[in-house]
Image (cartoon, rainbow, N blue to C red):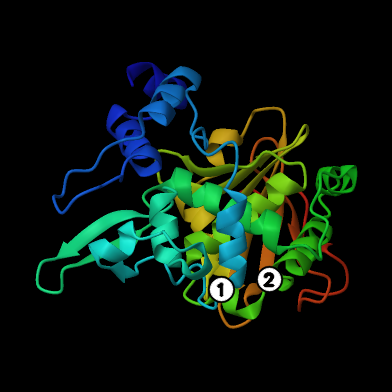
Amino acid sequence: IHAIAQEWKASEESIIDELKRWYNGYRFSRGDICVYNPFSTLNFMSKQETAGYWYATGTPSFLIEQLKKGHQSMFSLDGATARKDELMDISSLADIDLKALMYQTGYFTVQDYNPISKRYHLGLPNEEVRTAFMNSLVKHFTSTVDVRSSEKYVVALEKHQIEILFEHIKVGLSSFAYSVFAGAKERTYQAILLSMLYGMGFDPLSERLTNTGRIDVVLEMPKTTYIMELKLDGSAQAALKQIHEKEYFKPYTHAGKQIVNIGANFSSQLRNISDWTGELLSEEGSLLQTLHPKNSHSGVGSVSGSIGTSL
């Protein structure tokens, strides 16, 4: 823990919190004792980075097929309740309970127990499981969109052509069935965005810890570092403002790369990205350009602003 804290330039307490958020949360009884995933915890200690170690091999295909058949939103299942006999009964494959299947395959765990109703409250145990779940959903539910690795998007981002990236993401999100997003929260949209970035050939970092908070997404390119803050039913401007208030970009200054700050907003009504805004900074953190969608009120084109303004 001490070595990781030094490497991350963070406190030991924050590293323990991060470890808990990613790999703790498994609960198998009415008691409130939660356990860590030992395999993933050891990998985290060895590699000193958060990743989906346990679920690296993917989601069982049978579970995906059942999710496709289900009439409920997959996200609304998070927080569902069930009796013990319902969780234990997966004998009939023709009429299997989706909550029981999620529990038996390790995607759901016990979060609480009501002794009066004798029902268990279920949910995704931690960030590792949530990330794996979203990766599988993107892979299997965006069949109309090719999200394979592409040099096109790498080149676009190196040229700071953010419009190309977001248009592709919008098309990908629109390929999901409307009911899929019922009950989805901000972290769900964030996880799906990360999964799509992975599918496009990038290696994004999620919830990157700083001394002022957590950055939603960090994307390291050869010549540019992208910092993204996401909102649900808020505004892109509010997201960009948070980047400034928390100074998320500061640790990436003087590192030999330009920096792009992006604020993006998801709309629960549209089930998609409603707006985004951004800015290009110099290696030292000075404003070079503001970045907007082509159809925004800022004017024709995707860049505007003055050169050399200090932040």
Badge 1 amino acid: Phe
In the rendered image, which quarter contains the N terminus? Answer: top left
Query: Gap between marks 2 and 1, in whole Å?
Result: 8 Å
Residue 80, above or below 63? below
- As drawn, is 36 to the left or to the right of 308? left
| Pointer 2 local density, CA inside 10 Å: few below 14, some 14–19, many at least 20 | many
Number of numbered discs on residues: 2
| Pointer 1 local density, CA inside 10 Å: few below 14, some 14–19, many at least 20 | many
Looking at the rendered structure, which numbered label has been put on residue 113? none
Q: Residue shown at 72%/73% (left/top)?
A: 174
Res. 267 image quadrant: bottom right
Looking at the image, tell me whether mark 2 or mark 1 is earlier in sequence order. 2
Badge 2 amino acid: Phe
Q: Which of 101 and 158 is in front in this view?
A: 101
Residue under numbered circle 2: 176
The answer, for residue 27, to whether it is visible in the render is yes
- Percent position of residue 71, x then y: 54, 78
The answer, for residue 229, to whether it is visible in the render is no
- Percent position of residue 49, x then y: 50, 28
Report helix, strand or loop for mark 1. helix
Q: Residue shown at 50%/62% (left/top)?
A: 93
Q: Which of 236 and 121 is in front in this view?
A: 121
- Percent position of residue 34, x then y: 23, 43
For the view shown, which residue lies furthest in the left direction?
116
Q: Which of 13 and 113 is in front in this view?
A: 113
Residue 111, above or below 25? below
Report helix, strand or loop for mark 2. loop
Are discs 2 and 1 less than 8 Å apart at CB? Answer: yes
- Percent position of residue 77, x then y: 42, 69
Residue under numbered circle 1: 181
Res. 118 image quadrant: bottom left
Q: Residue shown at 61%/34% (left/top)?
A: 253
